[in-house]
Image: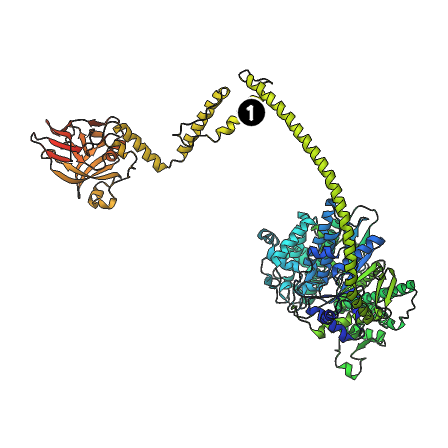
Amino acid sequence: MESALTARDRVGVQDFVLLDAYTSESAFLDNLRKRFSENLIYTYIGTLLVSVNPYQELGIYTVSQMELYQGVNFFELPPHVYAIADNAYRMMCSELNNHFILISGESGAGKTEASKKILQYFAVTCPMTESLQIARDRLLLSNPVLEAFGNAKTLRNDNSSRFGKYMDIQFDYKGIPVGGHIISYLIEKSRVVYQNQGERNFHIFYQLLEGGEEELLAYLGLERDPQLYKYLSQGHCAKESSINDKNDWKTVSSAFSVIDFTEGDLENLFGIIASVLHLGNICFEENDQGCATIPDIHEIKWIAKLLGVQPSILLEALTHRKIEAKTEEVICPLTLELSVYARDAMAKAVYGRTFTWLVNKINSSLVNKDFTGKTVIGLLDIYGFEVFDKNGFEQFCINYCNEKLQQLLIERTLKAEQAEYEMEGIEWEPIQYFNNKIICDLVEERHKGIISILDEECIRPGPATDLSFLEKLEEKVGKHAHFQTRKLAGPKGRKRIGWMEFRLFHYAGEVTYCTKGFLEKNNDLLYRHLKEVLCRSKNRILKECFLVAELENRRRPPTVGTQFKNSLSSLLEILISKEPSYIRCIKPNERKEPNKFDDLLVRHQIKYLGLMEHLRVRRAGFAYRRKYEHFLQRTKIFIRFPRTLFATEDAFEFSKHQLVARIQATYKACLERRVYVKKRQAAIRLEAHWRGALARKVAKRRKWAVRTVRKFIKGFINRNKPLCPDNEEFIVFVRKNYILNLRYHVPKNVLDKSWLRPPGILENASDLLRKMCIRNLVRKYCRGITAERKALMQQKVVTSELFRGKKEGYAEVLNQPFANSRIDEGDINPKVLQLISNEKIQYGIPVIKYDRKGFKARQRQLLLTQNAAYVVELAKIKQKMEYSTLKGVSTSSLSDGILVIHVSPEDHKQKGDAILQCQHIFEAVTKLVMLVKRGNIVDVVQGSLQFYIGPGKEGTIVFDTGPEEQIYKNKNGQLTVVSVGMKSS
């Protein structure tokens, strides 16, 4: 309770019973508005909870909030749905009786969300064991499955429950949830085949198309676009921004696995869903005889495949009707209108019975096989009172249900109030508050009469129409005070009632119903011919839903109105046997906007939810009552007027701080002394035990150390003996220690020759490890070499074989990489390329060619192909030397770049040996040798060499060293090559 008067003025009172002007609807509305503007969406009327949908997240449903309300007295904390849940749970556990929580309100008021919050509260706060966690998860995950198949987008709510649901949560004697059971009421089957503008079919259709895997949709014969299906596109809002069908599909799919659906179950279930969509796309045409035909049987084939029926039999059942006479059966063709009716009736029947199967399947997964005594808490999430511009058969049934529940609420509230006053010995006369109950009784009597008349019209022989039903109503219940038609109403009321309408005066106000479609929806007949097809289906779910025994029963099935009336009676019997709690949900505006409070809309809901009547009943006697344990520990105190309560509470708030401070000081001192004494005694005991434990630990460690040292000394003495118990541990230790140390001294590359010196007993093992290590390093080094580098190294190996220790400058070029070629292809004359086009140039280098006679220097190019070496001058090939005819290659041991290619004298095509000088002598000779592919053709000479000039003629090249490089013809006619001497490294 808000403690200060200023707070009460700003946020209102948290219990409507505390309003002074409790008979004023405006004061009631004003208090509700104040609290809503402060995001206080919950308010009590005694133990009844009024909830206003905030249309936003308020952060009041956390685990910490759940723990705050757990086990706390009902009125000690602000109003909350958790308080209702916790109170019901504690009463059930303490009194071992059954409870139920009735959640009501119109579509979009938050009924489904309230039931979810209650389930989540029980899941988090109730004691739980691992073995029962599956039951808890199935209880929670049954919600998204039922919402997918039973909820739809309407004009008022994006997730409107189109069926009533009662769920029993079963608890064992420890208060642990162990199972559950669900009962569904009046699924809105007509939505399967028709939706108003701005509304959608049931969620599951859109979820399947949006989130289903491609393979699944292909198996079902479906496309992703919902606009392709008549049953999904009539409302023109198949895509809704506030609904994420793909994510919802994932949630439903994961829930199926937890609730124990098999692959076969899901295959059959989705086959039925897809067949409904295919049914809606069947197009009928009228033939010359006025009978219906189906020209395109594409959809028929898909339905037959998915449901496991014969296409021809299904085709006949949709266009013909079987009429049974006494001795024979007659097959009559259907008109276009009747065929459409038969198709839609089949779609509704298949979906409606599948939904019932789905509920039963969930119940089988929730059943607890332990038959020991259990208590239950029921959750009733039922449609609220509905008043639309056009109200039909569904609104009639829904409002009848609300009349019955309102009657139950009043009866139970009055009975509970009377019992409490009698127990306290207080006289109370609530006669004037029975007026609403009397109205409910009269309305119930009128509803029963209308349903009976509707059933009579459905089963009587002869033609029956919605108009004849209305005339029968005027005849039978026309004199009832709460019934009007256009014919029976006065001149003023007649204008507001159509010729096909009647008006009922409910406890919540008057509602006008249109009788169009009443008989059809109440009958909800499925032609026998279609029923035979479905009974013979191979789809396992349909086989359970449509039993062959139905065909043998010639009795007319009960009408929808009768079924609903009977199931409602059973529900009331269940509720009467349990202790009630109530939650009334209110929608603050039609647009689902946060922080918007529509006075007119909320006032209307306050009226038809009967909140003012409930408040008047609670205020008929003493409005506020609190046990004397909370008020000076006496028996219960009854306060008639709220201002008395507020004055008492304010006086208590003023004086309690003075009293509490003094009490707290004395009590805290006493507690602290006790705590200090206990801590001191505990510390002394703890220190003594700890010192003893430490001493024992040290002694134990010393003994272990002595044994270990002795053992290792003995092992060291016997280390060179064969392995035995005396030296085993020592040798193992030495091995381990050496291996551990060795890992820090392993060579890093193949050139690193260091190695950790091993003990004598491990020398053999150390040698093996060293060899393995070197092999591994070599393997790693070899694997890391690229193909290009490998080729380069192979060339360097050839160079080493040719020149190592023979020619100066070898060491300097060892680390210099060889080029693939020293001449680009663009630098070679195109005519030369054309002349040797049949051979690929492997290497090229600029050279200086010296004439064999005058030794005149000329710029040339040396080109090496796969088969020959070419000396080229611009566009001419001056000399071609095939490798097969080469006699050898000569070069000096000095650092000059002279290269002599010797040709065979027998080769008459050749003019003589080629005397060349190049900058990269080692590279050029290596490339030439690798292309010639012959060994021992290179001769590294010292001093001089002879070369072939022509037949019978030879020349000499003299090699010498000097201060500078020179090449000239000496006096003796010899070519002299002077190179600068290099220091040996």
Q: Is the residue marked by circle 1 packed among few (<14), some (14-19), or many (20+) residues within 10 Å? A: few
Answer left or right for 876 relative to 459. Answer: left
The answer to whether one can see residue 910 in this image is no
* SS at circle 1: helix
Total count of labels: 1
Q: Quadrant of residue 804?
A: top left
In the image, is residue 164 above or below residue 844?
A: below
Where does label 1 land, which residue? 733
Residue at far left of view: 971
In the image, is residue 496 above or below residue 33?
A: below
* Residue 226, horizontal then vertical, whole percent: 60, 61
> In terms of depth relative to the viewer, which is nearer, 445 or 385?
385
Answer left or right for 827 relative to 88. Answer: left
Q: How is the image coloured?
A: rainbow
In the image, is residue 796 above or below residue 735?
A: below
* Residue 981, horizontal then vertical, whole percent: 19, 31
* Residue 185, horizontal then vertical, whole percent: 76, 60
Residue at 54 percent of width and 18 percent of height: 719
Q: Quadrant of residue 806?
A: top left
**Quadrant including the C terminus:** top left
Task: Say which amino acid is labelled 1.
Answer: Phe
Q: Quadrant of residue 522?
A: bottom right
> In terms of depth relative to the viewer, which is nearer, 269 or 918?
918
> In terms of depth relative to the viewer, which is nearer, 49 or 891?
49
Answer left or right for 139 relative to 744. Answer: right
* Residue 726, horizontal then vertical, whole percent: 59, 18
**Quadrant including the N terminus:** bottom right
